[in-house]
Image: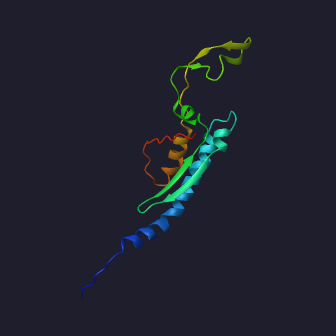
Amino acid sequence: MKATVRLDKAVVLAVAASRVSPHVAETTRLAMNRMRVLAPKRTGRMANSAKMTMRARRTSIVGTVTVSPKYTLPVHNGSRPHIIRARKKRALKFHGRHGVVIVKSVKHPGTRPRPFMWRALVEVAVPRGYKVTRTVTVRSVS
């Protein structure tokens, strides 16, 4: 007796996607919630702006967590020492230790990295069996 089995690739991928999609969605949601807990909380803008999206492709299911404030990347990855100059006005004005300070530029000492998004991903995804690699996608949001 001889049997022939033919698998339709599109059907196999569709069945696999339907089984995997809920697991990816739950892992993405858990990572987003953990990221909100670990995010710096001075104003709470980073944590509150977190959004989750899911995208199904022919051969993969992708869950993404995005955070919208422009300062998220320097907070997450840290920044080198740099000079801050007045852009729209002729000078910078801020409250210093001894009152109001007006200067044309200041030397920012830089900031240490606070990789709260990376930590959240590793803490959630690795125990659930995902392999996590360090890749960063930066998209400019105007």
Pick the front one: 115 or 50: 50
* Residue 75, position as x, y percentages in the image: 57, 32
If the image is split into quadrants, where does the N terminus sit? bottom left
Kindly indicate the quadrant of the structure image that contains residue 133. Answer: top left
Residue lying at the far right in this picture: please name it: 99
Q: Is residue 89 left or right of residue 138?
A: right
Residue lying at the far top in this picture: please name it: 98
Q: Is residue 27 left or right of residue 14?
A: right
Q: Is residue 121 left or right of residue 4?
A: right
The image shows residue 109, relative to residue 128, as above or below, that is: above
Instruction: Identify the residue shown where x is 60% and y is 15%.
Output: 105
Pick the front one: 89 or 35: 89
Kindly indicate the quadrant of the structure image that contains residue 99. Answer: top right
* Residue 96, position as x, y percentages in the image: 71, 15
Kindly indicate the quadrant of the structure image that contains residue 25. Answer: bottom right
Instruction: Identify the residue shown where x is 56% and y is 41%.
Output: 141
* Residue 10, position as x, y percentages in the image: 40, 70
Instruction: Identify the residue shown where x is 55% and y is 44%.
Output: 120
Way the structure is coloured: rainbow
The image shows residue 27, relative to residue 116, as above or below, that is: below
If the image is split into quadrants, where does the C terminus sit? top right
Number of callouts:
0
Instruction: Identify the residue shown where x is 58% and y is 20%.
Output: 84
* Residue 50, position as x, y percentages in the image: 62, 46
Residue lying at the far bottom in this picture: please name it: 1
